Amino acid sequence: MQILVAAVGRLKAGPERELAARYLDRAAKTGPRIGLTGFQVREVVEGRGTSVESRRSEEAAALSALMPPGAARVILDERGPALASRAFADFLARERDGGRSAAAVVIGGPDGHDPGLRDTADLVLSFGAMTWPHQLVRVMLAEQLYRAVTLLSGHPYHRD
């Protein structure tokens, strides 16, 4: 199952980009042994609309266009549950074992997600009730994807 991180906004060069890339590189090296491949990041520009709704709608269309047909959709949104790392790994394993060829984890823009896109999610996931800078969300997501790979492969990185 290929893993796509689809995000609104460009992560500029710097320590956050380097750290996120390091975690995704680690995941990409171990993932194929357990059927998780093709870790990639695709970015879309922020919506240019004059209202929050129009920006969200524009971003949702661009994000949807990036997602492979039939991909499991994980939408990062403050309204979702905050899962334990093992539960997130188990979700990815269930989707992989259920025959999904791809999973897309979607990070919205400053205005959040269009409700229509959120409604298409297989999982709405929160990193907690606090608001996080976009750069740190990318790093946290990359680390959790790496952690999921290590959990599913039996690597001792994660400790319960």
Image (tube, rainbow, N blue to C red):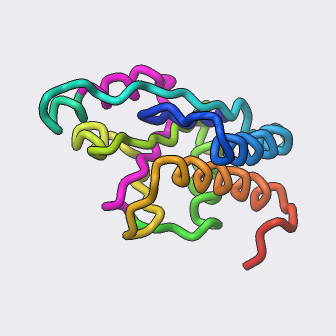
What residue lies at 28% left-to-right and 27% top-to-bottom? 47
Considering the image in quadrants, where does the N terminus appear? top right
Q: Is 83 displayed left or right of 113 in the figure? A: right
35, 148: nearer the viewer: 148
Range covered by the magenta-colored residues: 58-80
What residue lies at 35% left-to-right and 40% top-to-bottom? 109
What residue lies at 46% left-to-right and 46% top-to-bottom? 74
Q: Write down the quadrant of residue 12 in the picture.
A: top right
70, 112: nearer the viewer: 112
31, 146: nearer the viewer: 146
Would you place residue 90 above or below residue 115 in this image? below
- Percent x, y of residue 63: 40, 28
Q: Is 3 displayed left or right of 78 in the figure? A: right
Q: Write down the quadrant of residue 91 in the picture.
A: bottom right
Q: Write down the quadrant of residue 27 in the picture.
A: top right
Considering the image in quadrants, where does the C terminus appear? bottom right
* Outermost residue toward the front in this view: 14
